[in-house]
Structure formats: structure tokens, C-alpha cells
Amino acid sequence: MGKKFVVAVSRQYGSGGHEIGRKLAKKLGVKFYDKELLSKIAQDSGMSKNLIEYYDEMPSKSLLFSLAMDAYPMSFTEVPINQKVFQAQVETIKKIADEGPCVIIGRCADSILSDTPNMISVFIHADMEAKILRVKERDGLSEDKARDRIIKTDKKRASFYNFYSLEKRWGDVASHDLTLNSSRLGIDKSVDMLYEYIRLRGPID
């Protein structure tokens, strides 16, 4: 293993982003955080895990991203709970990035770690037909319900990311180092491609 680095993976629902991230972490030999991150946030912050899960990637309707980054014009006790949860998320993500190489799924990790050396931002997307098929098989849904879940979840993720990132847009090629259509290569070859990209970038030997 070479330098310390973080791979931040944003993903469309049903694109296989979680599986790609998990397999990539295994191939790289580094830690992997998706739902695991929620337990760590709860542990670090002292908040309940149920509360953290409830606000996980939930769009905010008030304040600005800067308010969640220690610039509150009010006391912490007056801050809305969703902002407290996001602030706890910021602190935990920065902590695990500082601890060593890892792959983090979602949670605005690339924006939070934008000033972190060797942070690689990846966006995984897929054709709608491929996403519907994956969600149907995985979640046991009809085609219509699978499509509806994909649209609603992606809208939620985009709103969350766009609100807290401000200067970046969810899925915009200019907001990520690399965007990848998993429909074209499949899961394993997508992992191989990302691994090679990271190797060429220099963080690993």
C-alpha cells in the first residue's frame, strides 16, 4: 500500500454503487464505510443510532451548508437536529479519513473531504433498465414500484448532496474525478477499472 487516500463514492440507486465500493475496498485492502458509518457517527457523537439513521442523507430545508461547518450565529442547542446530525457526520468522516485509507459511500464525503490530499471522488450511475432490474431482483418489487423507488431515492440523494455541497452538483461530471456507467462493464469490471484509475493517480503502489 502506498500513500494515505480516500475514495468517496456517490451513486444512483440501483447502480450497484454499494457493491462496487465494497469490492473495491476489498481489492485495495482498505476499510469500507456505508451503513457502518452510521454506527461510528452515533458512537463518536453520543447520539442515538436510530436518530442518525432517520436523518441519513435526508435533504435539509433550512440554513446553509456553512452553518453546519462551525459557523453558527446561534448556540449549538438552538441548531435544528438535522444540522446537528450532519455536523456529527462531518466530524466522523474527517476522523476516519485521517485514520487511514478507506472507501466511503455517499454522505457528501467528497465535499466534506474536498481539501483532503489524495481524495478521489467517484460517481456510479447506470441505465434505468439496468437499475430497475437490479432493484426488482434485490428488493422483490414490481417494475413500476422499482422505478418509483429509484426516482424518489435519487431525488433525495441529489437534494441532500446539492444542499450541503453548494459548489458541486450530484452526478455532474465537473463535480467528480470520475463518473462510471456500471451498466457498460458490470460490477467486477467496474471495480477493476476504478482500481486501475486509483493506481494511475498514484495513491497505491
Image (spheres, rainbow, N blue to C red):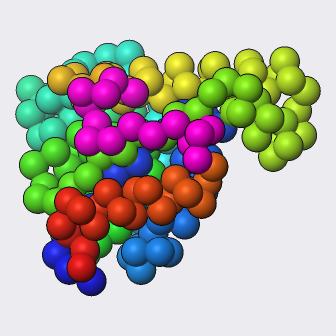
As drawn, 85 above or below 74? below
**Residue at 32% across, 17% down:** 62
Q: Can residue 5 be seen in the rendering of this structure?
A: no
Q: Is residue 88 magenta?
A: no
**Residue 177 counted in the magenta span:** yes
Q: Position of residue 120 (x, y in %)?
A: 26, 52
Q: Position of residue 94 (x, y in %)?
A: 22, 58
Residue 87 is drawn in which quadrant? top left
Q: Which of the pair 163/106 is nearer the observer? A: 106
Q: Residue at x 36, y 45 (%)?
A: 122
Residue nearest the observer in this picture, 99 or 168: 168
- Residue at x 11%, y 59% (from the top left corner): 117
| x then y, percent, for residue 12 | 54, 33
Q: Nearer the viewer, residue 57 or 48?
A: 57
In the rendered image, the quadrant that contains the N terminus is bottom left
Can residue 67 be seen in the rendering of this structure? yes
Kindly indicate the quadrant of the structure image that contains residue 99: bottom left
Left or right: 68, with 102 as reference point: left
| Image x and y of residue 96, in percent | 29, 67
**Residue 106: quarter of image:** top left
For the point 21% across and 35% down, the residue is 68
Quadrant where the C terminus lies?
bottom left
Q: Which residues are magenta?
A: 171-185
